Amino acid sequence: MSEKEISNIIELNEDLIENNERLANQNRNLFKKKNIKSIDFVGAIGAGKTAVIESIVKRILKDYRILVINGDVTSRIDADRIEKHGVKTIQVNTGRECALNSYHISQVIKNYDLNEIDLLFIENVGNLICPSDFILGAEKRVVIVSITEGEWVIEKHPMLFKMSDVAVINKIDLIDVMDVNIDKMVNDAKKINPNLKIIKTSAITGENISELIKEIIN
Ligand SMILES: Nc1nc2c(ncn2[C@@H]2O[C@H](COP(=O)(O)OP(=O)(O)OP(=O)(O)O)[C@@H](O)[C@H]2O)c(=O)[nH]1
Ligand SMILES: [Mg+2]
């Protein structure tokens, strides 16, 4: 590949990211105007994003009108899991794309009456790398990993921790069967981003889910 071809690809990527940021800003402004709190959940496949969101909505659905946007390459399994709690959902299938982008979100909210909601949760496609290129315009980003991914998972994937507001270390109920040093995970996250709020949770037992709710909603 020639140097010119390589520089064209770099320019194309920069354009994509710039366009994404422009639309993300539009989404952010619209959420503010409509007084909607918006939170974007990112994390590896199976870390517990849907389970954590389920655990949160079960506790707060009497107090807030909630919409959950679920991103997945295919299927509406996650949206169905959330909807069984009586919460409205929209599934976005990204096909070959490994992350949601701000265009997906702008299309969803263009066709939805935002006066009907106070809280918007967005579950991104399970991936610890791709979502770092695409902000969505949400007020806060929560990155979720779990102890079953091993104690090196944060050290190996610093990007999403740099750009998130809250880091959740999930599945702590499994600590006795996992040979994992959770303190190392916490220290890695702090080193990468000293401003991160770090919360150790179990979506199954509910441990520290109330603390997470306080952090993201209040
Ligand atoms: N023991 C335990 N299991 C959990 C916990 N959170 C999630 N799980 C289980 O882990 C599996 C994956 O959880 P999901 O909530 O589907 O994970 P996800 O991050 O949404 O996965 P994708 O959307 O496919 O990326 C399910 O079988 C959950 O029941 C937890 O805190 N403790
Ligand atoms: Mg999920």
Image: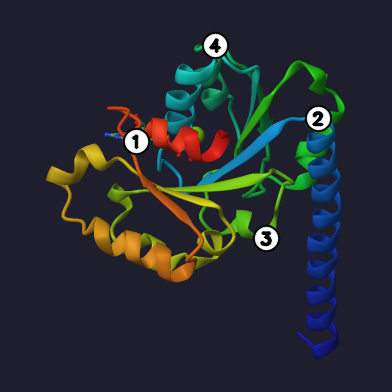
N-term mark: 2 or 3: 2
Image position of 46 with respect to 127: above or below: above
- Amino acid type, residue under disc 2 in the picture: Ile
Q: CB under 8 Å between callouts 3 and 4? A: no
| Residue 183, quarter of the rendered image | bottom left
- Amino acid type, residue under disc 1 in the picture: Asn
Which disc number belongs to residue 109? 2
Camera-near label (3 vs 1) is 1
Q: Which residue is mark 4?
A: 62
Q: CB under 8 Å between callouts 1 and 2? A: no
- Amino acid type, residue under disc 3 in the picture: Asp
State the CA–CA distance, disc 1 to disc 2. 31 Å
N-term mark: 1 or 2: 2
Q: Which residue is mark 3?
A: 133
N-term mark: 3 or 1: 3
Image position of 147 with respect to 37: above or below: below
Q: Is mark 4 within 8 Å of ligand 1?
A: no
Q: Is mark 3 within 8 Å of ligand 1?
A: no
